[in-house]
Amino acid sequence: MSLTLQSLLDQGCFLAGDEGLNKDVIAETLIPRVIYFTIDSAASDPTRRGLVMVTSTVGLVNGNAALPTTALVHHLQFASVADPLDSTVAKKMRFANSWPEFIRPLDSTLGYFLAVQSSGANQFYYTQPGTAYSPSSGYTGNITLTTPQIPTLPATASTAITVNGEIEQDLVLNVAKAIKGDLWMKQGA
């Protein structure tokens, strides 16, 4: 579904009641944080994670590439990797929890992937099954991050936010909560 930024602001302010009156400008400044909070919360819940998943194609050069800036990298462990040229690769890929595990894996018959933050960007590293990591001669080509895919922030283009209908409702409710100061309160208190 697609929700315009203005509609999100209007609905959130309306649901906030008296506290939302004339708060359009304030609500607009909260939108990036509300979007992040909403998507991250859904991605953290195994029963809702599928609502915020997307497929990304990553072009690798020597086994690494920059990840999309919208990717929530701390949820990468829920992703899997497929090679469009070899359908057997996906079953042999594993997420590596750390750089030492990535460069010296316990099972050398598997392929591994990892994201490392470097200079503010998230670098994605990949080794094919049965291949040791080499920074100068790694895999070059496209791979696909597939089901379950990396949860990402929704794409915004021309003031539209495109998300699943359930997440759309969460965004509106969370804008109202943020305006009222309730969104950042400790959950369950």
Image (tube, rainbow, N blue to C red):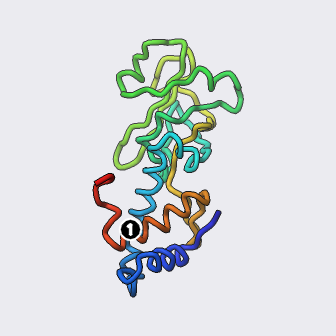
Figure check: 63 above or below 174: above
Figure check: 174 above or below 113: below
Q: Which residue is mark 1?
A: 177
At 40% from the left edge and 48% from the top edge, which residue is drawn? 121
In the image: residue 65, left or right of residue 104 = right
| Mark 1 secondary-structure assignment | helix
Quadrant of the drawing holding the C terminus: bottom left
At 38% from the left edge and 68% from the top edge, which residue is drawn? 177
Q: Quadrant of residue 18?
A: bottom left
In the image: residue 74, left or right of residue 108 = left
Q: Decide: few, some or many residues near mark 1? Use Cα within 10 Å; few <14, some 14-19, many ≥20.
A: many
Q: Quadrant of residue 1?
A: bottom right
Query: Relative to the observer, which residue lies in front, 180 or 3?
Result: 180
Query: Relative to the observer, which residue lies in front, 172 or 147?
Result: 172
Q: Quadrant of residue 109?
A: top right
Q: Residue furthest bottom?
A: 22
In the image: residue 35, left or right of residue 130 = left
Query: Relative to the observer, which residue lies in front, 31 or 14?
Result: 14
In the image: residue 85, left or right of residue 6 = right
Q: Position of residue 13 (x, y in %)?
A: 44, 78
Q: Residue furthest front?
A: 189
Q: Position of residue 137 (x, y in %)?
A: 52, 25
At 58% from the left edge and 49% from the top edge, which residue is drawn? 51
